[in-house]
Amino acid sequence: MKNSSVFSRGGKIFDLSNIRGDMYGGLTAGVVALPLALAFGEASGAGPIAGLWGAIIVGFFASLFGGTSSQVTGPTGPMVVVFAGVFASLSGNLSLVFAAVVLAGLLQILFGVFKLGQYIRLVPYPVVSGFMSGIGCIIIALQASRLFGHEPEGGGTIPALTAIPGAVMDPNFVALGIGLLTLLIVFKWPKTWGKFVPGALAALIIGTVISLFIKGAPILGDIPTGFPSFIMPSFTQDTFLIVLEAAFILAVLGAIDSLLTSLVADNMTRTRHNSDRELVGQGIGNTVAGLFGAIPSAGATMRTVINIRTGGRTKISGMLHSVFLLAVVVSLAPLASQIPHAVLAGILVKVGYDIIDMAYLRRAHKGPRWDLALMAMVLGLTVFVDLITAVAVGVVLAALAFVKKMADDQLGAFSELSPRITTEEERALLEKAEGRVTLFDFGGPLSFGAAADLGHRVRERVKGKPRSLILDFSRVPFIDVSAARAVETIACDAREAGKTVYVTGINEAVNKVLAGLNADHCIPGDTRFESRLDALRAAVADAIEETDQTKESEPALNPTG
């Protein structure tokens, strides 16, 4: 394909080779983003215009400087849920709230500079599924009362849930009718029609038009027009920790959300994104957004998919999506003041439903039970505690489960009664030894997970008869401190019991750890061999010689006559 790049900085930015597809993709993504940005802005507490400016500012800069060419950035369900909590916890103090947004953007830039993108993507799928599904449940809970024409008192999931019964018992029937119609449209809008008018946009227009003729449903009211004002971020000594915690949560969540969307874009376009550059782009966008009172944003999966399916392939598509929204803000903001809350609530209920990982939940019972339990636990913590606790607990438990599985595999590799025999000569030598030589064939990396049981397993195997132990490290690529100390204990216990320890197959990395910690001081230098066969020959010869000497001394020790 002809390269029409006119500006390059570590990769294509203005690549005109796909300009027609990028224009159509960016325009379509902008149309889809319009109702979502308004809805997310309203749900955040900062107002619908803040949602639009979030899509405009972060969407433009993340595309310009990011590492995923076809990605569209804007307000997302997970980011809005967290931001709404921050907005409420800081009592709507704009200087503090947007100080957290600016700091979150700076943290994301640092994540990219220090190349942490590859680690953020290592969050296990059950944890991702759990917190995404939990966020979907939170969005639905927060919007349920609005479908009935009521506003939940207080922020957070619990107040929203407790407000639902009262809203159901005392509905605003106009709002309820508009809300149900919105739900019907967003859930049942034909896919063929969606190619021309997205269901969310159709619901927004139809619901708003109906509310103009049938009065009674609460509406957004006056929306500021023009360009946003600069907001000077500030915090005091008392509020610094609150702002820092909020910024860290926003930064990590935005990074995870964006990189997951980047993976989706990679699968669709058969390309490979740059994780660290994407984090820098997202960070620049969120930093600028925070300075102008716009809500934080992240890579938006649905808008990215729509952009790609309608032809968008380069950074131009994401930037055009923002330009389209800018035109809407400048010219059409007064019309948006007539949008009913129930319409935006219905659109967000569909967003929440889409975020819930139904594909996994339908088949979770056929997969590992532990993964299902982990997903359910993270979901519950997300809904009833907070997101950062849910992710932290989920990652720690997933890591511990992985370590336990690896430890079991490591122990299982050498706990079998019959070691791995590679040649007939080895088999013959072990038979000749008649149980006086025990071979331990370590089957993989030795780490702290296996260290606790390592010494115990060896002691159980060498009670009584064995004269010699052979420790085969040929399949051990590395060893950590805990396992090195376990090897030291095995060797020293064997020496105290009068047994000889032979080692074979130690590579340079393992030898460096053992020698550096002096964990090999109980292993004689003359019992180390390159090949296991040589170690077996020496051990068997030593065992036979020891047996012969014992037999020769028996008459003298036990005279008869």
Image (cartoon, helix red, strand yellow):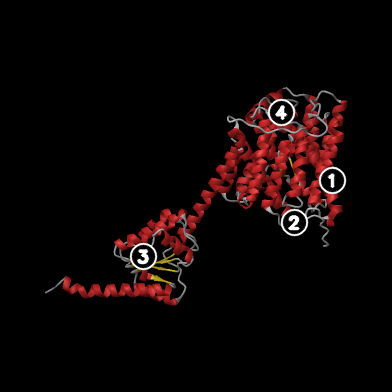
Residue at image location 38% in from the left, 57% down from the top = 455
Would you name the residue on which mark 2 appears? 11
**Could you tell me if the residues under marks 4 and 1 are in contact, i.e. CB atoms within 8 Å?**
no
Q: Quadrant of the N terminus?
A: bottom right
Q: Callout 4, which amino acid?
A: Ser
Q: Answer with mark 2 or mark 4, whichever residue precedes in sequence.
A: 2
Q: Answer with mark 3 or mark 1, whichever residue precedes in sequence.
A: 1
Give the CA separation, mark 3 to mark 2: 55 Å
In the image shown, does 139 or 304 lie closer to the viewer?
A: 304
Circle nearer the viewer, 2 or 1: 2
Q: Callout 2, which amino acid?
A: Gly
| Number of residues whose C-alpha sits closer than 10 Å to that of mark 3, classed few (under 14), some (14–19) or many (20 or more) | many
Whole-percent x, y for residue 274 in the image: 69, 54
Residue at image location 68% in from the left, 23% down from the top = 166
Q: Answer with mark 4 or mark 3, whichever residue precedes in sequence.
A: 4
Whole-percent x, y for residue 68 in the image: 73, 52
Would you name the residue on which mark 4 appears? 145
189 up-or-down from 167: above or below: below
Q: Quadrant of the C terminus?
A: bottom left
